[in-house]
Image (tube, rainbow, N blue to C red):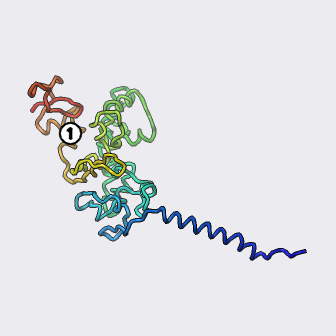
């Protein structure tokens, strides 16, 4: 009776084919992987592979992609070379108050500001909410401690809060940008946390990417807030924004006519104004 083959021989017969298959797999994956010709490095010395694809981003000097990169603001994986892995965990709007502590508010950027913004009246809407609840008979005083953030977390609703959501809730900083695809454009321009005030559209015009899709230029980050950003929200109720600029809302029939057409002087929502 022949003896059993030694264990080392059995191990080799199993291990060698496994190594061969592993080598074939790694070779195939490497052949399929499109690696950039060089590492993209910011002027601060950090590897930022995003810059191999996003080569045409023009921002102000303080936020320039070649200086700070993309990932400090948009998160994601700055060391990945594939689009899917690089964009995993990415945020489109770094100013969104849900993520701002990880983006704008990190140490070395604006660490003191997220707390201030989240407690501002433009984020809490505390005065609007407490007054509305009081006059609708749902609170005993106008000093109710209730904020938009609390409503988002609790899901609390009532007749007064439903009224707030329908008429007032598009003008607070917790609203996400572009979250109402079927609504008029000016609704989607509102909100966005820090970027509600501190961003304006890019100036380079739309471009077409490799997939044939239109691509808007990267928004510009600004320190000096233009009047248009304020008026985007402050144009109803007390109409503080339009009063500040010296105009007033007129009747909705669009006069005086301009060459037989309705007036071009319009507020968000196609409401007309006069100077």
Q: Residue 163: image x %, image y %?
A: 35, 28
* Quarter in which the C terminus is drawn: top left
Residue 119 in the image: above or below residue 46: above
The residue located at (41%, 54%) in the rendering is: 90
Element assignment for label 1: helix
Q: Residues within 10 Å of mark 1 (few under 14, many from 20)?
A: some
Disc 1 target residue:
231
The residue located at (66%, 69%) in the rendering is: 17
Residue 8 in the image: above or below residue 249: below
Apparent side of residue 29 relative to residue 249 in the rendered image (left or right): right
* Nearer to me, 267 or 51: 51
Q: Residue 80: image x %, image y %?
A: 43, 62
The reply to whether residue 17 is in sight is yes
Residue 109 in the image: above or below residue 98: below
Apparent side of residue 230 relative to residue 152 in the rendered image (left or right): left
> Image quadrant of residue 256?
top left
> Image quadrant of residue 16?
bottom right
Number of numbered discs visible in the structure rendering? 1
> Image quadrant of residue 150?
top left
* Nearer to me, 234 or 8: 8
* Nearer to me, 193 or 204: 204
């Amino acid at each position: 009776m022949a003896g059993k083959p030694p264990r080392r021989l059995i191990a080799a017969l199993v291990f060698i084919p496994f190594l061969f298959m592993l080598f074939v797999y790694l070779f195939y994956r490497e052949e399929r992987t499109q690696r950039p010709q060089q590492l993209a490095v910011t002027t601060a010395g950090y590897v930022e592979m995003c810059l191999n694809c996003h080569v045409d981003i023009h921002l102000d000097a303080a936020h320039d992609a070649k200086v700070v990169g993309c990932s400090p603001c948009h998160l994601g994986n700055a060391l990945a070379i594939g689009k899917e892995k690089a964009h995993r965990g990415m945020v489109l709007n770094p100013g969104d108050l849900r993520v701002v502590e990880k983006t704008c508010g990190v140490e070395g950027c604006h660490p003191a500001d997220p707390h201030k913004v989240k407690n501002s009246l433009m984020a809490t809407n505390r005065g609007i909410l407490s007054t509305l609840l009081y006059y609708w008979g749902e609170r005993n005083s106008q000093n109710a401690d209730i904020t938009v953030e609390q409503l988002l977390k609790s899901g609390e609703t009532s007749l007064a809060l439903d009224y707030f959501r329908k008429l007032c809730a598009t003008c607070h900083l917790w609203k996400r940008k572009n979250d109402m695809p079927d609504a008029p454009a000016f609704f989607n321009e509102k909100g966005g946390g820090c970027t509600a005030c501190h961003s304006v559209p890019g100036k380079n015009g739309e471009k077409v990417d490799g997939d044939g899709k239109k691509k808007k230029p990267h928004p510009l980050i600004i320190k000096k807030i233009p009047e248009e950003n304020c008026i985007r929200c402050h144009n109803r109720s007390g109409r503080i924004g339009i009063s500040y600029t010296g105009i007033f809302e007129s009747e909705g029939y669009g006069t005086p006519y301009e060459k037989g057409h309705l007036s071009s002087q319009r507020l968000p929502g196609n409401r007309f104004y006069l100077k």
